[in-house]
Amino acid sequence: MSTPQSPLNIILIGFMGSGKSSVGRALAKRLDWEYLDTDRMIEDEQGESIAGIFETRGEEAFRELESGVAHELGTREHCVIATGGGFPVSSQNCEAASRAGILVFLIASPDAIWHRVGRSRHRPLLAVENPRQRIEQLLAERLPAYEAADLKIETDGKSQDEIAEEIAQLLFAQTDTGSTKP
């Protein structure tokens, strides 16, 4: 499905539980592109889970590892890349990702996010007394960074395949005009 005008990569950003991983896998399959997940890249490189990194080294150390991965994205082509929820908060990460491809913001409401991840024990940033309130707080803080994306897709009430199809249609309909950014 890729053409000479295709974007280098499609980089999915959004809050935890917005569907970046599941949509990313579906989109990569649809396009016959490689699927990458920045969190998995960090885990593989470090030999430790994200939760373990947060616990033993802290969020700041994790964010530094994440920035290292962001700069690696420019060496890839024809990948669908799912990022961590806090990835775009760093302007350096956004700049590196933007040079590497098209940023797609998967928008999910606080209710949808809570439903999807509210009881997860694998989300270090939700290991607080009131995780629902923490979701709303973090989402509000991160929204300006997410809004810098090239394309925004609402995910509530849609399947991963429907979202992947919507992204493919929007991006490739626009790249047929010769533009690499929608």
Image: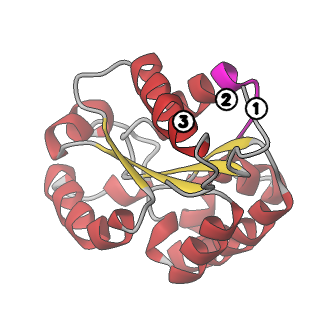
Residue 14: x and y, percent? 40, 52
Q: Earlier in the sequence, mark 2 or mark 3?
A: 3
Q: Are marks 2 and 3 in contact (CB under 8 Å)?
A: no
Label 2 – label 3 distance at C-alpha: 10 Å
- Residue type at tag 3: Ser
SS at badge 1:
loop
Kindly identify the residue that appears in the image at 77 percent across and 42 percent down.
Answer: 78
Magenta highlight range: 29-35
Residue 131: x and y, percent? 21, 52
Kindly identify the residue that appears in the image at 44 percent across and 22 percent down.
Answer: 160
In magenta stretch: residue 32: yes
SS at badge 2:
helix
Q: Earlier in the sequence, mark 3 or mark 1?
A: 3
In magenta stretch: residue 82: no
Residue 58 visible to the viewer: no
Residues 35 and 168: in front is: 168
Residue 165: x and y, percent? 48, 23
Residue carrying label 2: 28
Residue carrying label 3: 21
Residue carrying label 1: 33
Kindly identify the residue that appears in the image at 23 percent across and 23 percent down.
Answer: 157
- Residue type at tag 1: Trp
Kindly identify the residue that appears in the image at 51 percent across and 81 percent down.
Answer: 91
Q: Quadrant of residue 85?
A: bottom left
- Residue type at tag 2: Ala
| Local crowd size for mark 1, using a 10 Å CA cut-off: few (<14), some (14–19), many (≥20) | some
Residues 118 and 86: in front is: 86
